[in-house]
Amino acid sequence: MTSHDDVPISHLQRRKIEGRVLIPFIETLREKLGEDVAGDILDTTIRRLAVDDGKRWAETYGPSIDSLKQVAEDVWAGGGSLELRIIEQSANKLDFNVTRCAYAEFYQALGLADLGYRIHCNRDHAMVAGFNDKLELSRSQTLMQGAACCDFRYRTKS
């Protein structure tokens, strides 16, 4: 018997599968518990998963800025799910813009960009904490929220 981890699927496919399960679950949570409690449960769960992803990627790729770029290109953008434009990179800095995002396109097509932001984009800062707690991320806009690009700015903390 083969475990689910042995079946190669893209990061985008994994997120779409998660979304198709989470969306009705979240709707039920909202109905039963209210928006605030459901949102808190969702945010806490997504952040926990993101920290675990960050740890796993750091173990696989290493916890450096160069490794983070590799994760962005190989995992997040794998299979054409994102179009990345590297702005600047050094030992202590990685700046890139995402100019196309199939994750955002998926949620926007469902009319659920707000939920997509919570399920997908909300992971980014927590992932960094799991990947390397000496790094920090700033991002002022996302495609999911209707901006022209997502502006990822990673730095080594001083």
Image (tube, rainbow, N blue to C red):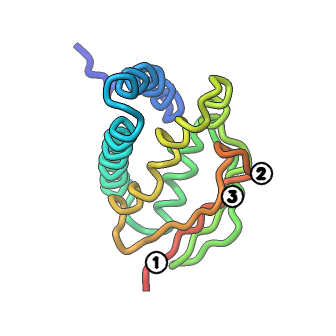
Residue type at tag 1: Thr
Q: How far apart are the two marked residues, 1 and 3, measured between alpha carbons?
A: 18 Å
Q: Check disc 3 and give the amino acid type.
A: Asn
Q: Where is the N terminus found, in terms of image quarters?
A: top left
Q: Label 1's element? A: strand
Q: Nearer the viewer, residue 84 or 28?
A: 28
What residue lies at 37% left-to-right and 32% top-to-bottom? 34
Residue nearer the viewer, 117 or 58 = 117
The residue labelled by disc 3 is: 97
Q: Is residue 143 above or below residue 128?
A: above
Which residue lies under the disc numbered 2?
A: 148
Q: Amino acid at mark 2?
A: Ala
Identity of the residue furthest to the bottom in this view: 158
- Mark 2 element type: loop
Viewed as shown, does residue 33 lie left or right of 93? left
Q: Please state the horizontal and vertical placement of residue 97, each as a whole percent of the image.
A: 68, 58
**Is residue 58 among the parts visible in the rendering?**
yes
Q: Earlier in the sequence, mark 2 or mark 3?
A: 3
Mark sitting on residue 156? 1
Identify the residue at horizontal 59%, vertical 36% (top origin): 103
* Image coordinates for residue 102, horizontal then vertical, percent: 65, 35
| Mark 2 vs mark 3, CA separation in Å | 10 Å
Given residues 67 and 114, the one toward you in this image is: 114
**Of label 2 and label 1, which has the lower sequence position?**
2
- Asked whether the beta carbons under mark 2 and mark 3 sit within 8 Å of each other, the answer is no
Q: Looking at the rendering, which quadrant does residue 108 occupy?
A: top right
At x 37%, y 74%, the residue is 134
Q: Are marks 2 and 1 in contact (CB under 8 Å)?
A: no
- Residue at 39% x, 56% y is 126
Q: Residues within 10 Å of mark 3 (few under 14, many from 20)?
A: many
Separation of marks 2 and 1 at Cα, in angstroms: 26 Å
